[in-house]
Each structure stands twice: as structure tokens, then as C-alpha cells.
Image (cartoon, coloured by chain):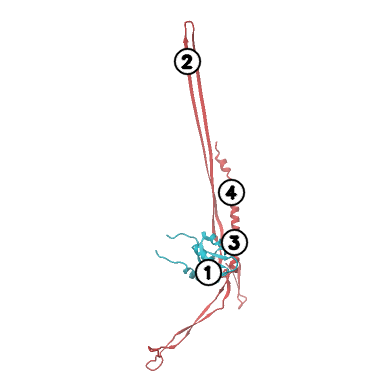
Amino acid sequence: MPNVGAELASVPFGKMIYDMASAIARSQVALDKASIQLVKVLANTTFDYVPDVVETLLPNPRQVRGANGAPLVDADGDPVMITGVQVQTDVGDSFPLTLLQAGVNPTFYAFTNSQIEVKMSITSTQESSNTFSVGVSVTASADFLFASGSVSSHVNFTSANKYSYSVTGSSSMSTVLNPVPPPKNMMPRFFLVNAIDPAKITVSQS
Amino acid sequence: MIPKVAFQMYMVAFNGEFSQQMSREVQHHIRKLNGVTLMVMKTGIIGAFDDSVAPFVQAHPGVKLVGGVTLSPHGYAADRLQRIFAENLAKQIQVKTE
């Protein structure tokens, strides 16, 4: 007789879970290594950062010119002036800034919600057939002084049993990979020392 | 119909010494894969492309490393970078109304 419980017990759940957890752990280490490698690249990639550009609007008075290009004067003979404006630009000195300082952070990933699904189908069929036949033959003969008779019988019995038993199984494993914020101990800390007031030190971390 | 794509920002680090030609080749490679270049530096490119094409970008001989990045709003120059990214993006995409 098929034993469903025994079939289920034979599924190597423990090994499947171990193999999956082991594969996830190996993948997680590889992903973390790649992200740490990226931290190094970002920390070594610099660009010239211009901290500020000061634009100063300065007065630029000038006399209005007439149609023939001659300076225009009013009825009292005073020149007609407009305020005018001149923009003076003062670009601050640039300094190298790393992408990490600028705000570009590496993406870290974490596996979440792993699932193992095992499907099993057990089919058992039993087919029995019996045939039974009985035959009787009677013969009799009679003569002048002698009479005889015989009776014979036969019994045929055939029995056939067919058994079939099949087990099919399938398993699937799935896991979800999510981006997560950079772990604190994998990201560098930034110490901002104000040289004007060295007592003021700001510590920040992405 | 607009296809659903998982666009992400990536840092694409160059392999070896910087050269203008190699940088352009990598940028064209990203463009061919329907990605965009947001910023170019001497060590690499910050680009945006679909998750599924990341291995193909990595496969380019001029590429050493491809890794997902995000822009932290607390960064020293995050707003400036965001503006640079937006300006460069605007030069590469066409907005159509249907």
C-alpha cells in the first residue's frame, strides 16, 4: 500500500534549506564585496567642485542716444541718463571633491523573503479480475446386461491483479533581492574641521 | 504603451587609464542599450539604464565595474549633481505627448 507520509518524509527538506541558505549567503557576500569595491571607486573619483559663484550687480549709468546716435538731452539741456547695470562675476576657487562626499552612495542589496515549495503527486491504482467457470458432463450407456454412466466436472478459476504506483515531485525555490541603505560600518565617516574655528568639528555619515 | 522598465543609476568604472575614445565608446555602448549618461568623469560614468542590461554594460572591454548608486540628499553637492544629471538627461531624451 502506498504510504504518503513515508514519501513526504523522504523529501530532503533539511538539505534543500541548507543548500538554499548557503547559496544565498555566498551571493550576499559577493554582492557586499562588489558594493565595497564600489565605495572605493566612489571615494577615489574626484571632480572639481566650484563652491560658489558671486554675481554682483553694479550700477552702469549711461546717456541715452537719439535717433542719429547723438547723446540725448532734455529741455533744460541736461543729459538723459538711464541707470544701466553691469554684472560682476566672482568665481570661487574650485577644489577636488569625491563622489562619495558629493552624495553619491553605493547601493547595497539584501535577500529577503526566501521560499521553498515542494509539490508531490502520488498515484496508486489496483486492478483485480477473477474468472470462474464450472462445467459438468454426464455420459450414460445401457446395454442388454450392462449399463454404465459417468459424470465428470471441472472448475476453472483465474485470478489477475495489477498494481501501479507512481510518485512525481517538483520543487521550486525563490528569493527576493531588495536594495537597502548602506550599512553604517561599511561607509566612511566624514569629519568636517572648520579651520576658522577648529573647535567646531562636524561628523557625518551617509 | 510605455514599457515597464527598472531604471537605476549606476556607476560605470573604466578599465585602466582614461582615454577620451574609450570614454565615448562606453557612452555609446550605454546609449545602444537604451541607457543614458548622466555625468562623465575620468574614472568612470554615472549612467542610468535598465537592470537587465547591467551585465551587458559590464561586458564591455572598457568597463571594470558596474554598481548601483543612489544620490543622498545630505551629500555636500547633491543638489548640484542633481542639476547636472537633469541637464545631461534633457539632452538625451525626447519627450513625446500621445
- Residue type of the residue flagged with mark 3: Ala
Q: Which chain is cyan?
A: B
Res. B17 image quadrant: bottom right
> Which SS class for mark 3?
helix
Circle 4 packing at 10 Å, graded few (<14), some (14-19), many (20+), is: some
> Which SS class for mark 1?
strand
Tell me how far mark 2 sits from mark 4, CA to CA.
73 Å
Residue positioned 48% across, 21% down in the render: A134
Q: Are marks 2 and 3 on the same chain?
A: yes
Number of numbered discs overlaid on the protein picture: 4
> Which SS class for mark 2?
strand
Tell me how far mark 4 sits from mark 3, CA to CA.
27 Å
Q: Which residue is mark 3?
A: A34
Sequence-wise first label, 2 or 4: 4
Q: Which chain is red?
A: A
- Residue type of the residue flagged with mark 4: Met
Residue positioned 51% across, 26% down in the render: A158
Circle 3 packing at 10 Å, graded few (<14), some (14-19), many (20+), is: some
Instruction: Say above or below: A60 vs A172.
Output: below
Q: Are marks 2 and 1 on the same chain?
A: no
User: In this orientation, which residue lies closer to the viewer: B71 or A44?
Assistant: A44
Residue extending farthest to the top is A145
Circle 2 packing at 10 Å, graded few (<14), some (14-19), many (20+), is: few
Q: Which residue is mark 1?
A: B39
Tell me how far mark 4 sits from mark 1, CA to CA.
45 Å
Residue A122 in the image, given as x and y percentages of width and height = 52, 40
Please say if the residues under marks 2 and 1 sit with CB atoms less than 8 Å apart: no
Q: Which residue is mark 4?
A: A16
- Residue type of the residue flagged with mark 2: Val
- Mark in the foreground, 4 or 1: 1
